[in-house]
Amino acid sequence: MKLLILGRSYPEVETGMVGIFEYEQAQAVSKSSKVPIQILYTFCDNRSIFRLHKFNSIYKNDDHIIKIGKYFPIGGFPNKIFERIKTKLSISMLKHAISKFGKPDIIHIHFPIITLTEGIWEYLISLQSNIVVTEHYSRVQNKELSVKQIELLKKIAINADKFLCVNNLLPKSIEELTGVQREFVVVPNVVAPIFSYNEELGDGIYRFISIGRLVKEKKFDLLIEAFVKKFKDAPNIELIIVGGGEEYKSLKKKINTLNMEKKIKMTGFLDRAKTARILEKSNAYVSASSFETFGVPVVEAMSCGKPVIVADTSPLKQYINSLRGVLFKVDDVESLADAMGMLYEHHTVINSSEIAVFAESHFSEKAIAEKLCSIYSSCISRVNKE
């Protein structure tokens, strides 16, 4: 089977790890496919020069995945010019890849509103391969698309052989935007194997941990306020905030102003190995974010056996029960503080290994790869019958 994946970019620290969700799915399929498979991972990264900082192309053939892509920062150009250039670059890159490695049996498109234009979509349709689409995009879930983007999404919803979403909220938004009713399949993002359960001997300190980009939408300020409200004078309880971003300085100042620097610690950005290690040493994960399309750090924490706290609007709430965590009322500091207090008070009855087993069955490489391979096989079987 020949699989061509179209993602946003190739994940590298220097470019912000954009493309990590789609590339990790490709890795999972590569490791778990029970039939011979050739995976071609392609991208045309057109973010602005302020975010991308480079013009070049890549060709890599390692990890059993062939990577072909272009970095061409034109973000911020007028829409017509941007679309014309992106279409030309992407089709040229795809034609080169197909001429070298053959026509794909399956084309799997991630973040279609980001990775496609009308012209790219028409070219992919012309190949008459099976097309699988995965929607991850927050602007789709929030229904913040332009008229032109809605028209493109409608064409995709009508014509894609399979339409996957990373949560159970996106299908409703897509139906409301496009008026198209069809089958949607929920396939969550993958949790990398580095995030796994290892029993740790405690050091007498109970640690809450929160991980993410330090931006206003993630509500780390609310988290700090809730922690202070509940645990300001409680001994041997800490909050660890992992991540970097534009809010780092203001959050640090807030912590210092509250005289909480000994109980609330900010690590800055950490690579995955260090993040996994600090998760292992923590007792519970908390996300104060009011909006997510998925929330990968939450399921990474569950994979490490940690109970979690998320807002009652989270798409992950379907996976949370009293054995795995607590929900709080979104944007409510009192509710978040109470949720943290509740989890701490009941921490002795939490079964970490059961949380990890649940996460493995739902979000591991093996679990997600099995879902995807079944979807790919169903597409090919349908064509063979026809």
Image (cartoon, rainbow, N blue to C red):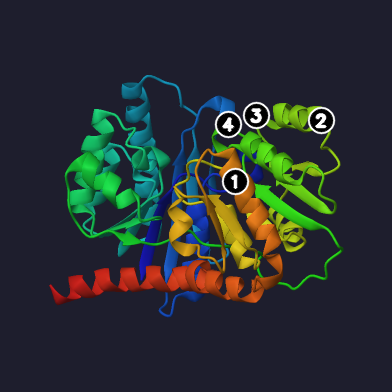
Tell me which numbered mark, 4 or 1, is placed earlier along the sequence: 4
Q: Residue 283 in the image: state x and y as whole percent.
A: 72, 61
Q: Where is residue 35 in the image (x, y as percent from the top left)?
A: 40, 79
Q: Position of 218 compared to 182: left or right? A: right
In which quadrant of the rendered image does the N terminus lie? Answer: bottom left
Query: Label 1 near label 3: C-beta < 8 Å?
Result: no
Camera sees residue 122: no
Secondary element under disc 1, as helix, strand or loop, is: helix
- Number of labels in the image equals 4
Tell me the residue that label 2 is attached to: 256
Identity, as a three-letter code, of the amino acid under mark 3: Glu
Q: Earlier in the sequence, mark 3 or mark 2?
A: 3
Q: Mark 4 points at which residue?
A: 216
Q: Mark 3 points at which residue?
A: 246
Query: Furthest-bottom residue in view?
Result: 34
Say whether marks 2 and 1 touch (CB < 8 Å): no
